[in-house]
Every structure is written in structure tokens, then in C-alpha cells.
Amino acid sequence: MSEEEWYLIDLKSRFDKIKPNTYYLSYSGGKDSHLLYWFIKDYLKRDDIKIVGINTYMEHHEIRDRILKNSDIVLYPEMKPMEVKAKYGSPCFSKIQDDFIDRYQRGSRSKSLMERIEQRSFVGKDGKVHKSSFSLNAKARELLLSGKLHRVSPKCCKILKKNTAHKFEKETGLKAILGVRGDEGAMRKTQYKSCFTKDKKFTPLWDLSDELQEKIIKKYNIEVPEVYKYIKRTGCMGCPYGSYKGDTQKELALISDSQRKFVMEYFKESYEVLGIDTNIQMNLF
Ligand code: SF4
């Protein structure tokens, strides 16, 4: 039996641990959640797990069309991106750093926050001196402390995605099946260490490697959006959170002129701070 076949048999045994009608598949239209979609629909042949997508207004059109096509239920956030920006500010450096900045810009000067912003050393529970591993980068710190930084906030993700999903979960009592994998980065590696999170979300792909995922996709001919030919992961169009890997610029090159116009307005100040070149044009779609 091949490695791919073994993995899918094991994945099936993981699904046997949940009561299907108490869970829904959180479907983003991306590679990981689509693998789960394929597994539920084509491999398990189950129709008792609802497929639920969120139209954040920020997806590549190809991904948005997949969400609309494959979801049983499409949810819409309570605010549109521009409303989030006007009320809270824009995403810029990373979710963690933007959270520190947001708290500072709203007036907090708590000891733990300032330790992170100023990257001060602190004495840990073990009595040793540590430097916080989660602190602001030098550029963010300089702009923030000199008052030159625009209004920054990580609330975009919270309002467009998290709150929308929470509201649905509260109304239906269903819990999410998430297509998240530890192989997607250091943060996820520490966050996802088993099939269930603390709040009982089901994360059955947590230990699936990039390599095995590709083999499964190839062997079973699972559909992959065109956009993945150009970028490794797709989130929202042009989100600056992908900028450290150069993904933001690549994404800007992939979208249409009208999409680019919207994205450049939404992330204008963040792009300026991050020095993102917005003039690349490829229009591959
Ligand atoms: S990934 Fe970026 S654009 Fe998308 S919801 Fe999160 S912060 Fe907003």
C-alpha cells in the first residue's frame, strides 16, 4: 500500500472520532481546505458535514468562485474591509505585532506591552533574564514611538473571518473542521499539535507534510486553483501579512486592474511603510 493510501486510511480513522453532524468544514477555497472537501465528498462520500465558506470580499476571484461553487452556506462578515479600516486601521507587519501596535495606539502603556514594544529584557518565572521572542521589529518600533505610523490594527482578520465564523458557530452549535497544517510555519507548528484544539476544533491535517500533500493531490488528481502555480499559499489579495515572503507583490501582479485599485487603497499606508512595489503588472487572470 502506498504512503498516500495509508495516510487517507489514517485520516478516515480520525474522522471516525467526530460526530459528523456536530461539525462543519470551514472552506476557504485554498489547497488545504479543498483537500478536506475532496476527502469528505469523494473519499468518504459523506453529505452530513456542511461545507461553509466566508466571502471576505478579499479573495482572489478564482478562490471566491470556488467558495461560491462548493459551499453549502456562504457567510458574509458584518463589516466590509473599508469599514474595518475606517474604524480600526489596517493590517501591516504581522498579526502579533499589529496587536501590540493597536494596543499602544489606543493608549495602553502596560508593562508587558512596553516590554514587547521596546524589546526590553525581562526576568522570567525561571528567574533568568529573557528577551521577548514576540516583539516589534525595529522599523515598526521607530515609526510607532515617533508617532509617524498610520493607524494599524489586526482587526481585519478578526472581523472578516473570526467573528463571522464565531457567529455561525454560536447560532448553529457546530464546531469547525479546519484545514490547517503544522508544516505551514513556525507559529502553526506550535499551535496545532494534535487533531483537536483546546476548543474542540477538528484539525485532522495537522501533521500532513507539504511533500505528502503534493503526492496525494497528484495521485488523486485533486483540483488546485491556477493561482497556486505562482504563489505557495493564498490568503486575501495583496494582504501585507504575506510581504515578508514576497507574496504580496506576487499577488498584486496576479490580480485585475480593478482588484489592484481596491487593494492599493485598502493597504495604501501599509504598503508605503513596508516599501511594497505596487507597479508590477502581470494580469494572469
Ligand atoms: S489575511 Fe489580511 S486581508 Fe485577509 S482578513 Fe486577514 S488581515 Fe484582512
Image (spheres, grey):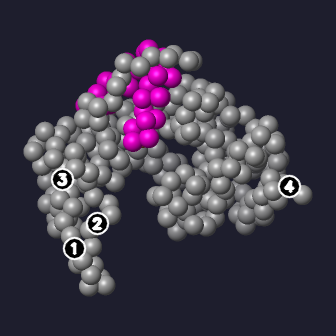
10 Å crowding of disc 4: few (<14), some (14-19), many (20+): few
Q: Report the amino acid beneath label 4.
A: Ser
Numbered circle sitting on residue 2: 4
Residue hosting label 1: 122
Residue at 42% across / 29% down in the picture?
A: 249
Residue 104: give its label.
3
Residue type of the residue flagged with mark 1: Phe
Callout 1 crowding tier (Cα within 10 Å): few <14, some 14–19, many ≥20: some
Name which residue type carries label 2. Answer: Ser
Spatial separation of the CA atoms under disc 3 and disc 4: 53 Å
Vertical placement of residue 89 versus 63, above or below = below
First in sequence: mark 3 vs mark 4: 4
- Label 3 residue SS: helix
* Of pointers 3 and 1, the one earlier in the residue sequence: 3
Q: Earlier in the sequence, mark 4 or mark 2?
A: 4
Label 2 secondary element: loop
Give the distance between the C-alpha atoms of the residues marked 4 and 2, in whole angstroms.
Answer: 44 Å
Name the outermost residue toward the left.
Answer: 146
Q: Quadrant of the C terminus?
A: top right
Tell me, yes or no, whether the two marked residues, 4 and 2, touch with CB atoms within 8 Å.
no
Q: Position of residue 237 (x, y in %)?
A: 46, 30
Q: For the point 25% across and 42% down, which residue is it?
A: 152
Q: Which mark is nearer the camera, 3 or 1?
A: 1
Q: Are marks 2 and 3 in contact (CB under 8 Å)?
A: no
Name the residue carrying label 2: 132
Q: Earlier in the sequence, mark 2 or mark 3?
A: 3
How far across and how far down the image is residue 140, in percent? 22, 46
Tell me which segment is drawn in magenta.
Answer: 243-271
